[in-house]
Structure formats: C-alpha cells, structure tokens
Amino acid sequence: MSEALLQQTQVARVAERFPEFMRRFPTPRAMVKAGPSAVLEAWRGLGYYRRARSLHAAAERIVAVHGGQVPCDMQALLELPGVGRYTAGAVASIVFGQHQPIVDGNVARVLSRLADRRASAADREGQSWCWEQATQLVKAAKDPGATNEALMELGATVCTPMQPRCGACPLRDMCGARAAGSQDEVPPPKPGAAVKRVVHHALVQIRDGRVALERRTEGLWSGLLAPPSVETPRAISCRQVQALSGASTVARAIARFDFQTTHRRVHFIVHPASFPEDRPLQWVPLRRLGSVAIASAGLRVVEAARGQGAPRAARLRA
DNA sequence: TATACGTGGCA
DNA sequence: TTGCCAAGTAT
C-alpha cells in the first residue's frame, strides 16, 4: 500500500495520509470489503487516481488468488494491477528480503552520477543501464531492502536533482561526477513534455444545498465526480458552452482561476447553469463534499461558486 | 515506443 | 509567474 501511494509522490505527502489508509484498510480483505469508491475517497487530493482503482483491484486479486496474503515472488507481484517493475522490486526486496533491484528517479540519478554517465537516464538505453547497475549492486548486498532504500534516500536527501550536497555525501570519494565536477549536468534533464493550454468551462448548479456532479469517464480526473464541464482550446460564449454541454441554461461566468498539471495549463471558468431533468447527475449535499471523491479542482469550482462575496443565491439560481 | 495521468513544493 | 521535479504504470 505504501509503495502504491509513493509512486510519483513524495514521502512527506504520503506520510500525512498513510495512517488513515492503514486504519481504514488494514488488510487486503478489508479493502475489498470497503469497495473501490472508499479507496478513491481516501485518495482525494493525491493525484494519479488510477492508482486508487488499481490498488483496490490488486487487493481483490490478492484475496481471490493468494488467500489474502501479498505474494512474495516477482511474477505474482507483477501480475497485480498497478504493480510494475519498480513496485514489485521494492516489495520483494524491502518486505521479503530478496535480491531484486529497483530503479526510480532517485536511483537513476545516483547511479548516473556515481559513474559520471553523461547520457540520458530516461531513454531506453539509459533505463537499461540503470537496471543493470542496480542489479549488480543489490546482488552483492547483505541487506537488499536496506541497500535499495539507501539508494533512494541518498537521492532524495543528498544527491538531489539540483544543488546536490556533495560535501555531505557518504559516497563522495567514489563519485565520478563529483571528481569531474559534472554533478550539475548529470544526468541531463529529460526533454520537457509539451504543456497544452486549455479552457475548462465548469457548470455549477446548486439546489437545496446540493450540487450537481457527474462521473468523469476520460481525460483529467477520469473516474472522479466533478461538475459537468466542457473543455475547449479557447474561451467560448455562454451560448456555445450550453450547446456543447447539453445544459438547459448557462449564465455569465462568476469566477475564473488558473492551475497547472504536468501536461496542461488550465484556465477555469465557472458558470452557473441548470440541466435537463433527465440528465444523470448526482446531487451531493454541499456539507458532504468533504466525504465524496471529487476532483480537487472541481471542489474549488464549487467553492468559487459558493464564493464569499459572490451574490451566490441569485446567481446560482440562474 | 510515446503519451497520459495530479499535485504541491521549490528555485 | 514559470518551469522543474517527485519512491511509475498502463495503454
């Protein structure tokens, strides 16, 4: 469970939430019983929500195929949803003491600098080289789990991407990059992913203290509840929003804000709206928004619509 | 093989 | 404000 939470997520952020996960889902069986929506709800705000659904599916497989016990061999681990080469290696080495290598962003950086390897660590050849190096290291280790964790911890705390603290590094005397003074250029940064700019028109209807939400099925926040919306390359008129969204009415925007994800820069525009009676919406009490799985930006949309200072009742009725 | 997938901290 | 980065996986 901790490794699922830690994928692409920093320790400090996971540490805040881990106790609640253990309390609510102490065993694979308990997680299966709680259901996928409970896991998604607990996952709120952590991002990469596919991991939440995968974790529940993994719990199901563990119960169905492995008698409720997390399997210890690599092949069985790799067959669990959401478990790839890194996670399987981490569990096998840290939990079960096997001589299995792991390579994450930290390890790739540490290994590249140790060997002063100037080529990219991100492409296939770089990854292959890293895994080979990690394999040799862990093969010779007395304690594979501790060795793997030490590599990651060194990368997270000392051998950092920028301004590495070489003076405090226990490996400084055997580090090729340190000797060559190349630590700031090794490994070379990955080519940045293009950031798409999109406008997200969010449609908020609040009635009797409830807000209309629907389950997103694709793209950003797929699988989460959020106010109905339309995404366009640039801002469009209320009438166009109405036509594209199938709303009955769409009123003038009452709030705007920007935020950025890894791959897109989103300009949010919040419109009061209403929907046809036959639209399949979930009417969630505003006071219970804290306990539903909802995209965090969607929550911000609702908060903006409720917004202090906004003459909300009149506008939202529109 | 290249993309898509979140969020918050930091320089 | 902007860009980069973080204990990766699935498609």
Image: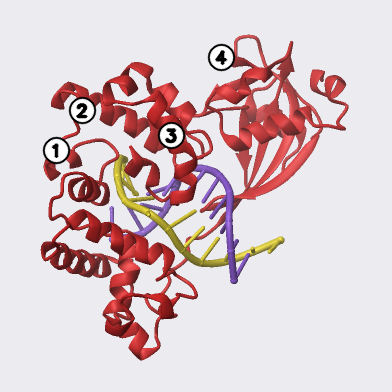
Chain colours: A red, B purple, C yellow
Amino acid on which the number 4 mark rests in the picture: Pro
User: Mark 1 — residue?
Assistant: A76
For the residues beneath circles 1 and 3, the answer to whether they share a chain is: yes
Label 4: element kind: loop
Q: CA distance from mark 3 to mark 2?
A: 21 Å
Q: CA distance from mark 1 to mark 2?
A: 10 Å
Amino acid on which the number 1 mark rests in the picture: Ala
User: Mark 2 — residue?
Assistant: A62
User: Mark 4 — residue?
Assistant: A280
The answer to whether any part of residue A236 appears in the image is yes
Residue A222: image x %, image y %?
Answer: 47, 34
Q: Is residue A237 above or below residue A26?
A: below
Label 4 resides on the chain identified as A
- Do the residues under discs 1 and 2 have CB atoms within 8 angstroms? no
Label 3: element kind: helix
- Do the residues under discs 4 and 3 have CB atoms within 8 angstroms? no
Q: Is residue A314 above or below residue A187?
A: above
Q: Quadrant of residue A302?
A: top right
For the residues beneath circles 1 and 2, the answer to whether they share a chain is: yes
Q: Quadrant of the C terminus of chain A?
A: top right
Q: Nearer the viewer, mark 2 or mark 4?
A: 2
The answer to whether any part of residue A223 appears in the image is no
Q: Earlier in the sequence, mark 4 or mark 1?
A: 1
Q: Earlier in the sequence, mark 1 or mark 3?
A: 3
Q: Quadrant of the N terminus of chain A?
A: top left
Q: Earlier in the sequence, mark 2 or mark 4?
A: 2
Q: Quadrant of residue A157?
A: bottom left
Q: Nearer the viewer, mark 4 or mark 1?
A: 1
Return the mark for residue A19. 3
Label 2 resides on the chain identified as A
